[in-house]
Image (cartoon, rainbow, N blue to C red):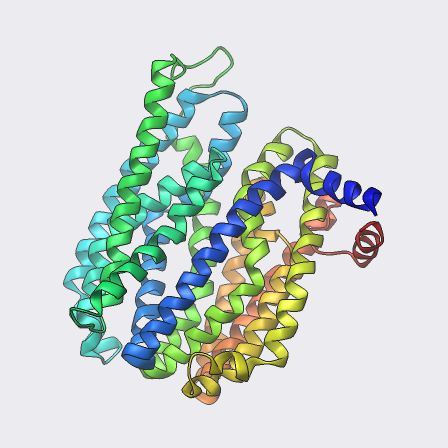
C-alpha cells in the first residue's frame, strides 16, 4: 500500500505534470468556492426574484462576457502564451512592451464599446428582447465593460507569470463573493431585477483596480532590479509582428466564447426571461462536470507553451496524457449523477425548474464530451496551430447558429442544448484527431492509459 501511495505521489507531485497538478489544484479550490458562491447567488435570486431574475442576471453576464472578449481583441489569450514564452527566456523588456501595447488598444476599444452599449441599451432591451426590465441592467453592463476588459487582461497576464492563486481569485471568486455580500445587504434595502448585476459590476471595478495594482507592482520591482532593459539575445519588440501571430488566436478566442454563449442569446430572443432562467440554471449545473479541465487549463496553458517551444515533446506528451486521465476520473461520476438524478438536482432550486430536466441531461453529455477530449483548444493555441483552430471554431459556430435557428422554434431550450452538443462534438473530435495526426499526442483519454492508471493506483 505504501508503495502505491508513493507511486501516486510521484506521478501527481513531481516533474512537469506535478507543476500542472499543483497549480491546477489551487485553481480547482478557487473554482469550487467560486462555483459554490455562484450557485448560491442563483438560488438566492430564484427565491427572491423568480426565474425572471435568474434569466436577466445570466443574460447580462453572457452579454458582458461576449463584449469583454471582443474588447480584449483576443489578446487575453495571446498574453498567456507570450508572457510565459518571454518569461522563460528572461525577456522582461518584451513583456512590458507587450502589456503596454495591448492595454492601450483594448482600453480604447472597450471605452468606445461601452459608450455605444450605454446609448443603445434601451433599444436592445425594448426592440430586441421586448423587456423594459432589461434597460437598466444593459446600461450597467455597458458601464462595467471597460473595467471588465482591464481586469481580464490583467488576470491573463498574471496567469502567464504562473501566479495562479492571484489570477484565479480575481477571475471569478472575488466577483461572486462581492455579489453575495451585496445581495445580503440588499435584502435590507430592497431588491430589483438589476440589483444582482449592480453588485457584480462593483466586484468588476474592484478586480480591475486590484489586478492593475499588482501588474504595476510587478513592473516596478523589475525596474528597481534593472531587469527592464533588453538583454543580448532579445529581439526588438514589434507590435505588428506580435499582432500577426495573435490574429488567429484573437478570432478563435472571440468565436469560441461566442459559440458557448450563442444558445443563451438566441433562446432569449425566442422565449421569455423565465424560460431563459431555467435554461441557464441547467447550463450552470452541468458545468461542474468540467471543473477539473478548466482548473488544469489555468496552469497548463503556460506549461504547454513552455514545453512545446523548448521542444520537450516527451515531457509535453506526459503532461497532456496525465491531465486527460485526471479529467476523466473526475468527470465520469459527476456526469452519472447529473444523468440519473436531473429532476432531483433541479428540484433543489425549485419545482418550476423540473421542465429543464432533459436540458440538464443534454448539457451533462456535452460537458462529458469536453472532458474526454481533453485540452484540445489550449494545445492548439499554445503550439502555433491557432490558424487551424480558428477555421475549426468558425465552422463549429456556424453549425451552432444554424442548428439553434432550426431547433429552438420547435424544441425550445432542448433544441438549444442539442445544438450546443453537436457543435461541441464537432470541434473537439476534429481537433483531437488533428493533434494526434500531426504530433502523435493524444489529448483525449486512451483506454489503455486509463487501465494502466487504475492498475498503478
Q: Is residue 8 above or below residue 455?
A: above
Taking depth in this image into account, of 445 and 105 the one nearest to the observer is 445
Asked if residue 218 can be seen in this view, the reply is yes
268 lies left or right of 127: right
- Camera-side residue of 322 and 436: 322
Indicate left or right for 87 with 440 as reference: left
Q: Quadrant of residue 300?
A: top right
Q: Nearer the viewer, residue 258 or 276?
A: 276
Q: Is residue 265 visible?
A: no
Residue at 46% x, 12% y: name it: 231
Residue located at (56% from left, 68% from top): 423
| Residue 57, picture quadrant | bottom left
- Figure check: 20 above or below 190: above
> What residue is shown at x 34% (from left), y 56% (from top)?
177
Residue 332 x %, y %? 67, 66
Residue 7 position in % (x across, y down) = 79, 42
Judged left or right of residue 418, residue 51 is left
Q: Position of residue 322 (x, y in %)?
A: 71, 47
Give the quarter of the image for residue 11: top right
Amino acid at each position: 500500500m505504501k508503495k502505491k501511495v508513493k507511486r501516486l505521489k510521484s506521478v501527481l507531485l513531481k516533474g512537469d505534470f506535478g507543476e500542472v497538478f499543483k497549480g491546477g489544484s489551487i485553481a480547482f479550490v478557487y473554482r469550487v468556492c467560486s462555483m459554490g458562491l455562484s450557485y448560491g447567488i442563483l438560488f438566492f435570486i430564484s427565491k427572491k426574484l423568480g426565474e425572471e431574475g435568474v434569466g436577466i442576471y445570466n443574460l447580462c453576464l453572457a452579454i458582458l462576457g461576449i463584449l469583454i472578449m471582443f474588447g480584449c481583441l483576443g489578446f487575453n489569450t495571446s498574453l498567456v502564451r507570450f508572457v510565459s514564452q518571454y518569461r522563460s527566456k528572461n525577456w522582461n523588456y518584451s513583456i512590458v512592451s507587450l502589456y503596454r501595447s495591448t492595454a492601450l488598444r483594448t482600453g480604447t476599444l472597450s471605452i468606445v464599446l461601452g459608450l455605444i452599449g450605454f446609448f443603445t441599451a434601451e433599444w436592445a432591451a425594448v426592440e430586441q428582447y421586448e423587456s423594459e426590465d432589461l434597460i437598466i441592467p444593459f446600461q450597467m453592463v455597458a458601464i462595467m465593460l471597460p473595467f471588465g476588459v482591464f481586469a481580464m487582461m490583467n488576470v491573463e497576464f498574471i496567469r502567464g507569470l504562473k501566479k495562479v492563486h492571484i489570477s484565479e481569485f480575481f477571475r471569478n471568486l472575488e466577483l461572486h463573493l462581492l455579489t453575495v455580500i451585496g445581495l445580503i445587504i440588499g435584502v435590507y434595502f430592497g431588491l430589483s431585477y438589476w440589483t444582482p448585476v449592480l453588485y457584480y459590476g462593483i466586484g468588476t471595478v474592484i478586480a480591475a483596480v486590484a489586478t492593475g495594482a499588482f501588474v504595476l507592482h510587478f513592473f516596478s520591482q523589475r525596474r528597481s532590479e534593472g531587469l527592464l532593459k533588453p538583454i543580448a539575445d532579445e529581439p526588438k519588440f514589434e507590435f505588428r509582428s506580435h499582432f500577426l501571430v495573435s490574429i488567429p488566436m484573437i478570432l478563435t478566442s472571440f468565436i469560441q466564447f461566442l459559440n458557448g454563449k450563442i444558445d443563451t442569446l438566441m433562446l432569449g430572443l425566442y422565449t421569455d426571461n423565465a424560460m431563459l432562467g431555467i435554461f441557464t440554471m441547467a447550463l450552470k449545473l452541468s458545468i461542474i462536470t468540467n471543473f477539473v479541465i478548466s482548473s488544469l487549463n489555468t496552469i497548463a496553458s503556460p506549461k504547454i507553451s513552455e514545453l512545446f517551444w523548448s521542444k520537450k515533446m516527451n515531457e509535453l506528451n506526459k503532461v497532456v496524457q496525465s491531465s486527460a486521465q485526471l479529467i476523466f476520473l473526475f468527470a465520469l461520476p459527476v456526469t452519472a449523477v447529473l444523468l440519473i438524478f436531473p429532476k432531483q438536482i433541479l428540484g433543489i432550486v425549485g419545482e418550476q425548474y423540473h421542465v429543464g430536466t432533459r436540458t440538464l441531461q443534454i448539457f451533462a453529455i456535452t460537458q462529458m464530451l469536453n472532458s474526454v477530449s481533453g485540452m484540445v483548444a489550449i494545445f492548439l493555441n499554445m503550439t502555433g496551430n491557432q490558424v487551424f483552430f480558428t477555421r475549426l471554431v468558425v465552422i463549429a459556430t456556424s453549425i451552432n447558429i444554424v442548428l439553434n435557428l432550426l431547433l429552438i422554434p420547435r424544441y425550445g431550450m432542448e433544441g438549444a442544448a442539442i445544438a450546443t452538443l453537436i457543435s461541441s462534438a464537432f470541434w473537439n473530435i476534429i481537433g483531437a484527431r488533428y493533434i494526434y495526426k500531426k504530433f502523435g499526442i493524444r489529448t483525449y483519454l486512451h483506454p489503455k492509459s486509463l487501465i494502466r492508471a487504475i492498475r498503478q493506483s
